[in-house]
Structures are given as C-alpha cells and as structure tokens.
Amino acid sequence: MTPDLENKKQWALAQLRKYDALAVAFSGGVDSSLLLALAKAALGERVVALTARSPVHPPSETEAARSFALELGVEYVAVDSQEMTMDDFRANSPERCYICKKVLFADLKAEAGRRGINTVAHGANCDDLNDFRPGMVAAAEAGIVAPLLDAGLSKADIRAMSRGMGLSNWNRPAMACLATRIPYGTTITVKALAMVDDAETVLREQGFTQCRVRHHGDVARIELPSQDLVRLMAPDVGPGIIAALRAIGFAHISADLEGYRQGSMNRSLSSEDHVHDSR
C-alpha cells in the first residue's frame, strides 16, 4: 500500500472511531466490503451489516454478502426492501434509484434504530460523482454517511486498499441492482429481473466475470469487456449461450460492439432528466 493510501486508510479509521456504533448498508460489493472491514477494525463488535433483499438483487449477491460478513465476524442482517411494491419505482423513470434508495435508507435506519445504532453508512466513493447517481441524493437527504468518499477514495484506491488488507473480494467485478439492466420508461417486472439474472448467470458460468445483459423486450443485449467479445462469438461458446438465453425467454441475442461500460443506460438521459444529479 502506498504512503498516500495508508494515510487515507488511517484517516478513515480515525473518523470511524468517532461513532459509538455503525450500521453499514452492505451490498457485498468491493466498496461496501472495504467500508465494512474498516468499520470492523475501528469499532469491533459495534458494527452490523444490513443488506437489502428483494427481486432486484440476485440471490447469489445476497449470499455473497452474507458470507463476507461472516468471514469478517460481523453481524449480518437481511432487510426486505419494498421497491417492487411501489408503482413509481416499477414505472422506471430516471428517478428510479432515488425512489428506491429513499425508502430503503428509511428501512435501514429503522433497523439500525431497533439495535440502538444512530448512524448508517454506505460505500459511495469519489468515482460515483462522475455519473448520474440520484441515489446519492437520497443518501444525503437521509443523513447516510459516506466515509470512503470523505476519505477521498476512488474505485482504484478501494481495490488497492482492499487487496493490501487481504480482503478476499478485492477484485470482485462491479455489480449493480438488476433494475439497471432495463431501459428507463420500461416497466420493471419480477419476470424481467429474473430473466436478466438467469442470463447473466449463464455468462458467468462460461467464465465471463464482468458482464451485463440489458433487457430490451425480447432482445438481450450483452455487454462484455471488449477483449471478451471474440470468445463470445467462438463456435464452441456462442451457440450454447444463444440457446440458453432463448430458453430463458429472449427471442434475439445481440452483443454490444462498444463492450461493457458502467452506466450505459444513462446515455439516453437528457440534461433535463438529471433532476437530482445537480443537487
């Protein structure tokens, strides 16, 4: 770990020690995993990991979060989130993430309060400031703290620090809730979410660790890192994936020639759509 990164780590630990106790909004991704590990180092048993559980989160991700928390020796609680019961969330406007996080953070704060914990933290980092992140506004409005962001940590910093601390998932591919695979304006359904999860499971089983399947009605648009596109089209790989995704319910299977890029669905947004992005 570089001296600069070590300084950021020590600064974050010092800030975390100021809390009597902390609940971490824990997805199991690299960012919230580092936050949980730092909180554990700073506060010991006065930390709890709270993970949202709903159809927008793949069961495999929820299980990975549980396993990591247990690996750290941190109490783990799955909190059933209610976004799929909300008409305005299912309508899938550009404010979808804000709507979801506003309710979710209220539920997490309530769960923390039942445990006598006054502060909830999430794993936002400096790179999150460079994309459309309405959920960040919901977090700020709810008083959710962001220690990694406050410490000036980028995604690359987080991976490097996680590796230096020996965290088992330091190189885990970036994840996001399954609703991000469905274009804005298209109603989110449990069936569509399950189709995406099943399709991405097929790709991961073929060794494509960083993948997205965007759900465009009966079309599956596969995003992979550019170097993986050739293997996707190989005669011993492509036909099997096509057959599997058709069995899931997609009539047409396409590969995006631009490859995987985070937040690709946000390209369709105009500046007027960024209602909460500028706040």
Image (cartoon, rainbow, N blue to C red):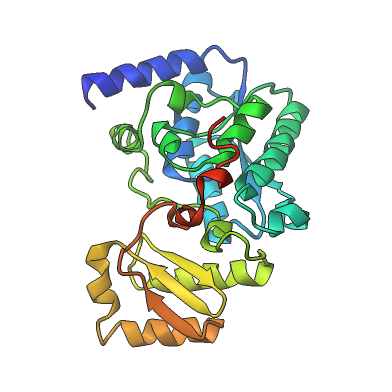
Asked if 7 appears above or below 220 in the picture, the reply is: above
Q: Quadrant of the C terminus?
A: top right
Of residues 35 and 136, the one nearer the viewer is: 136
Q: Is residue 166 left or right of residue 86?
A: left
Q: Quadrant of residue 19?
A: top right
Q: How far from the left and from the top, in percent, is residue 23?
A: 62, 29
Residue 54 rendering spot, x and y as whole percentages: 67, 55
Up/down of 53 relative to 25, above or below: below
**Near-viewer residue (84 or 134):** 134
Count of marks overlaid on the render: 0
As drawn, is 6 to the left or to the right of 243?
A: left
Q: Position of residue 1 (x, y in %)?
A: 24, 27
Q: Residue at x 64, y 42 (%)?
A: 98
Vertical order, 265 against 21 (above or below) = below
Q: Is residue 78 among the parts visible in the rendering? A: no
Instruction: Examine the rendered structure and indicate whether residue 30 appears above or below residue 235.
Output: above
Residue at horizontal 65 percent and vertical 57 percent from the top: 92
Q: Is residue 97 visible?
A: yes
Residue 46 placement (x, y as % from top left):
60, 23
Which quadrant of the view contains residue 233? bottom left
Along the line of sight, which residue is nearer the eye, 50 or 218?
218
> Which of the 4 image quarters holds residue 10?
top left
Compared across the picture, whether 147 is left or right of 235 comes to right
In the image shown, does 210 or 19 lie closer to the viewer?
210
Residue at screen point 39% across, 36% down: 127
